[in-house]
Image: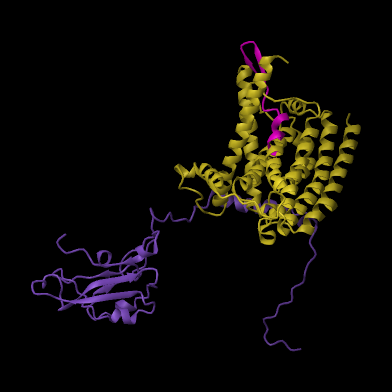
Amino acid sequence: MGTTDIIVKLILIVIIFLISLVIAMYSTYAERKIAAFFQDRVGPSRAGPFGILQPVADGTKMFLKEEIIPANSSKFLFIVGPSLAIMTACIGSAVIPWGQTLQIGTYVLDLQVTDINVGILYIFGVVSLGVYGVMIGGWASNNKYSLLGAIRAASQNISYEIAMGLSIIALLMTTGTLSLKEIAAQQHGWHWNVVYQPLGFLIFIICAFAETNRSPFDLPECETELVGGYHTEYSSMKLGFYLFAEYINMFISSAVMATLYFGGYNFPFMHSLGLSSNWVTILGVIALFAKIFFFIFFFMWVRWTIPRFRYDQLMDLGWKTLIPLAIANIVLTGIVMTLFK
Amino acid sequence: MEALSNKRKVLEAKPLNFWERAYLPAIVKGLGITLKHFLFTKAVTVSYPEQKREFSENFRGMHSLKRDEHGRERCTACGLCALSCPAEAITMISAERKPGEENLYREEKYAAVYEINMLRCIFCDLCEEACPKEAIYLDGDIVPSDYLRKDFIYGKDKLVEAPLNQ
């Protein structure tokens, strides 16, 4: 790897980092606006035209708020919690293939930070690290509500990671690779994995809701029972980081879902349009982001439709329904693969 | 036991069938309902300062102290409004009309200071009913918001109607 490569990769990292932060910022705006439309309201409309500057105002407000660290908290861990949450949320984007290659002069730019051959495992590792941020923050607050929220988050994430992993195994059996780049490339044309793995996708998306702590599985921050959940004691930008991490997680899991099941950067008729490969790549990036935005919208759509699960229902669904279903999916996939090979 | 009325209805709890227990059809139906609201239902919001809801004819808003047909203040500072006020929001200081002020005040006695505390006022209309001179009416707009409590004590500068020829 030459110096140019390193510089190009660094620029790419910064761009992806910025994009995920901006998308997380505007997800808060989108959430409020979409919630408003679902409830026949207008939503934020004062800051700038259509309230478009609302996230900037919110961010400024977060920075200017008084920072409170509870006297009896573990101060170091109290700060580590949100930092870990936002860091794990941000590093997940490293293995996602945002597009094919761009040809700039003689230089071939790969629109993926790194193509490690265990891409999916990396994502899983990062996702399971994410719960540490919540767990540490909740425990360090020295508050029973925070601790309860943190325990809920931990047990929920552990339970749903199993079903998620099992649903991915069936996918891996059909694709035969762990590299996200190859998985995306395999889905060229209409061979989207969702067609071959509908049940696996269903299990995956349900687990993605649980992993990102989104409604109907937002029990860790269940206001009616736990005040604010794991971030009860947090204020100022440390609270902002937790909320931000949730939105970045949503963005990353949308990107993963789009890449694994919905063809990633592939779009229909991409090679029969007669465009140069650079244009196809750019259109592919746009297609990927369109899919990601659809999934983000879907996250919000579900949030404003379904009421929250009760805790025992959540565990029931995870252990008694999703895990057996995921195992059955693996068996079914195996049988179909042996029969039709 | 005999039922008191015939309104009792025995409900039987039917066990859920497979599709009902699977949640998904119901969830899809619910998503459809919310999407219908997202796409088609117009927002019912009234963006207040720019847009205003239409008030009813007898809406009671901010008070105004009226003038008569010659532009003279009608109020004679009798204090009946203050007496009738259940919230004790009205206070006044009366003064005697000097010779030469007949074009300003209709009666021989007038209110030199007339103050209504808009934070106390409950807009009940009793002052308007008590007034023998038809000097006070609650025919104004909504009292605007402000930052300080002292700015909600409205004096004659805000309450008295504009003079006729202006």
In this view, the residue in front, A241 or A284, is A241
Q: Specify how the rendered protein is coloured.
A: by chain
Against A6, residue B53 (above or below) is below
Chain part drawn in magenta: A89-110
Q: Residue B120: x and y, percent?
A: 39, 72
- Indicate left or right for B41 with B52 as reference: right
- Indicate left or right for B86 with A35 as reference: left
Q: Residue A290: x and y, percent?
A: 62, 34
Q: Residue furthest left?
A: B100
State which quarter of the image contains the C terminus of chain A.
top right
Using the rendered view, name the quadrant where residue A228 is placed. bottom right
- Indicate left or right for A154 with B129 as reference: right
Question: What residue is at 72 percent from the left and 32 percent from the top?
Answer: A259
In this view, the residue in front, A325 or A114, is A114
Q: Residue B124: x and y, percent?
A: 37, 75
Q: Residue A321: x and y, percent?
A: 83, 51
Against B117, residue A222 (above or below) is above
Count of numbered circles on the image? 0
| Residue A168 lies within the magenta run | no
| Residue A93 lies within the magenta run | yes
User: Chain drawn purple, letter?
Assistant: B
Q: Residue furthest top?
A: A106
Q: Is residue A101 visible?
A: no
User: Chain drawn yellow, letter?
Assistant: A
Q: Is residue B74 visible?
A: yes
Using the rendered view, name the quadrant where residue A267 is placed. top right
State which quarter of the image contains the N terminus of chain A.
top right
Question: What residue is at 75 percent from the left and 48 percent from the top?
Answer: A135
